[in-house]
Image: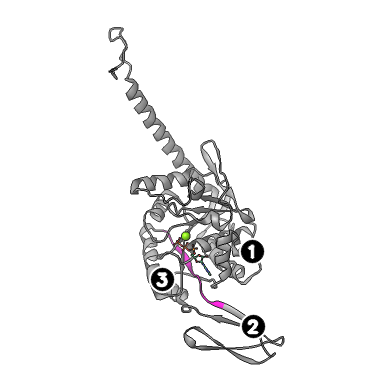
Amino acid sequence: MSSPISHHNPNDGESPAPSEEATADQKAQMEQAYAQMRRKLRMTRLAEDIDHKIMVLSGKGGVGKSTVATGLALSLARQGKKVGILDIDITGPNIPKMLGIEDTELHVEDSQIHPADGPNGLKVMSMAFLLEDPDKPVIWRGPIKLGAIQQFIGDVAWGKLDALVIDFPPGTSDEPLTVAQSLPNIDGMVIVTTPQDVALLDSRKSINFSKTVKIPVLGVVENMSGYTIRGNAEPNSQISVMGPQGVPVEATTNEDGEWTVTLDLFKKGGGQSAAEEFEVPFLGSLPFDPGIVRGGDDGVHRIVAEPEGQTAKAFDTVVANLMAQLAKGEDDAPEIL
Ligand SMILES: Nc1ncnc2c1ncn2[C@@H]1O[C@H](COP(=O)(O)OP(=O)(O)OP(=O)(O)O)[C@@H](O)[C@H]1O
Ligand SMILES: [Mg+2]
């Protein structure tokens, strides 16, 4: 068996050379330390190069966080802003699929990953691009997951951005905590909820989380808020539509006989009352829109498919309110958004 001890002659007056194993170990440690330092530097550069960093959270799963995060990013981007979206859901990343760019091959240069190009000039980064088999579940143990997230944030070459929207898996566990602690100068969090009480209750956790990590809540967005139906009847007449739980909803037709009714599928105003209760801003409501589900499956977001539609307009309103909150947060810095 070969000895790990150096074969250097101990009598030649020089100190013995370290063993090959020790050298390799030290080299690996040095490389690791270097990589960590580079990542930290990049993280600081990232914080400087990106004017606004916005986390999108929800207490509960399936409330439309990824749909809303993507919509906010697309809405900002179509106003001419340079925008990135970071899908930090490392176990079930789905934003590339929502944007129809899941087959993109990422370009790596200088050990930095260049984000993919999405619609409206959006820059997109997601673990989905790095997974060999999107159907295979990824299981990360705690510390490895944290390291992966840090690496994931620090190794992306975003360039200069007006805003970076960060989408998370549901809840307030490792992922948002790691980002909150690793990425400097985060502007705040957008909390997505649906109108039901149970979803609102879960939002409370997100609000408490914001206090723990000392990152402000920019506002609450109520998603799947109401479902609008339209029809035709006699001009200037009164019509009645059967609403949820058999409660009739009345409407008046216009001179062309068109009528519009918005049905509250769950409840109404829950997001607004939650915002009031938690004393955080209310950014607006987004309608329940079956086109969002189709768009998610087809990889064409509703905002891209129908830029002048009701949903796109609702997103624009939410973004206008969000921009007002961001501007408030910039005390003496010039207003960029
Ligand atoms: N406003 C809406 N109208 C109709 N369907 C919607 C709306 N918002 C989201 N959806 C649909 O609800 C489902 C869940 O949405 P999404 O994936 O965005 O939720 P999520 O909160 O990110 O979920 P997860 O907790 O798994 O990350 C999707 O099928 C999406 O198309
Ligand atoms: Mg999601």
Q: Which mark is residue 231?
A: 2
**Residue 71 seen by the camera:** no
Looking at this view, is 202 or 331 the one in front? 202
Residue denoted by label 1: 305
* Type of the residue with mark 3: Ala
Question: Does dot 1 land on a helix, a strand or a loop?
Answer: helix
Question: Does dot 3 land on a helix, a strand or a loop?
Answer: helix
Say which residue appears at 38% left-offset and 27% top-offset. Answer: 27
Contact between labelled residues 3 and 2, with CB atoms less than 8 Å apart: no
Where the C terminus falls, by quadrant?
bottom right
Find the residue positioned furthest to the bottom: 237
* Type of the residue with mark 2: Gly
On whether residue 225 falls in the magenta region, the answer is: yes
Quarter location, residue 288: bottom right
Contact between labelled residues 2 and 1, with CB atoms less than 8 Å apart: no
Name the spot of residue 305 as percent of width and height, x first.
64, 63
User: Does label 3 point to a residue whose CB lies under 8 Å from ligand 1?
Assistant: no
Magenta segment range?
A: 215-227
Left or right: residue 248 versus residue 138 is right
Name the spot of residue 190 as percent of width and height, x first.
47, 63
Front label number (2 vs 3): 2
Structural distance between the alpha carbons of marks 1 and 2:
23 Å
Q: Which mark is residue 266?
A: none
Residue denoted by label 3: 199
* Type of the residue with mark 1: Ala
**Residue 20 seen by the camera:** yes
Looking at this view, is 83 or 327 the one in front? 83
Above or below, comparing residue 31 to residue 267 in the picture = above
Above or below, comparing residue 132 to residue 202 in the picture = above
